[in-house]
Amino acid sequence: MFRNFTFAWLVLLSSGGSVHAAPPQYLPGPPPDPHHAQTRFGDADTSSGTLTIAGQATTPRAMGNGALFVEKVGQVGDTDYLLLTSTGNALCPASFSIVRVDSGMATPTAFFGNCNDIHRVQIVHGQDIAVIQPEFTSSEADTPQAITVYSNSTRRLAENGALLHTGCPNNLCDGL
């Protein structure tokens, strides 16, 4: 199955000032579903607002605010890693959680971030996961760039070098 993507490449011709769109591009496969990601241990599903892996809820339970999105960001050895995005509102559009998934369980971290929904993910030293968010400005506050690193060896989070609380109170990891 092919999807039709029309790229918004507009070219202003200097001779006549006309505007033309580039021809459509065709990419294979269905569009990605932000509520599903495939792990080696089953489908990660957030369509109900909580995370399930192969139909089973995680412990602690991961729950979003407005919506909860999931993407697979990597794998190290026998472990897969997911990034959850909990959507918020204009004052704080997003928070994130890293989920460690192996054959026995799926364990999310507490949600973190500086509220910016713009982010990129990098695998550091082949095993740690970094979520980088640029500075975020809202009507309520300005927050600096946040670089949050999940250490695979210690299973801890650090934001801009300071350790964060990784666990979730009352067995519930909830977004903003």
Image (cartoon, rainbow, N blue to C red):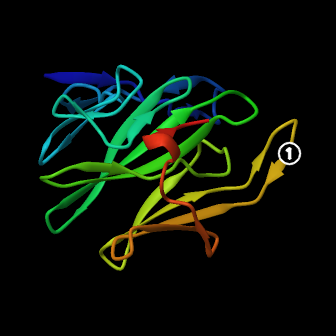
Instruction: Please identify the quarter of the rendering in which residue 15 is found.
Output: top right
Name the residue furthest front: 170
Number of numbered discs present? 1
Q: Quadrant for residue 50, please give it.
A: top left
Specify whether 57 is left or right of 85: left
132 relative to 130 in the view: left or right: right
**Circle 1 Cα neighbour tier, 10 Å, few/some/many (<14 / 14–19 / ≥20):** few
Q: Percent from the top left, x then y, of residue 37?
A: 25, 37
Describe the element under mark 1 as helix, strand or loop: loop
Of the residues shown, which amino acid type is indicated by label 1? Ala
Q: Residue at x 25, y 23 (%)?
A: 3
State the quadrant of the N terminus. Answer: top left
> Is residue 150 depicted above or below 34 in this figure?
below
102 in relation to 36, above or below: below
Q: Looking at the figure, which quarter contains the C terminus?
A: top right
Q: Position of residue 59 (x, y in %)?
A: 32, 43
Instruction: Identify the residue under disc 1.
Output: 141
Residue 132 lies in what quarter of the image?
bottom right
Residue 41 left/right relative to 137: left
Residue, x 54% and y 51% (percent of image)? Answer: 119
Depth check, front residue: 21 or 118? 118
Residue 41 versus residue 125 in the image, above or below:
above
* Image side of residue 46 versus residue 138, left or right: left
Compared with 114, 87 (above or below) is above
| Position in image of residue 70 (x %, y %) | 36, 38
Between 21 and 66, the residue placed more toward the observer is 66
24 or 16, nearer to the observer: 24
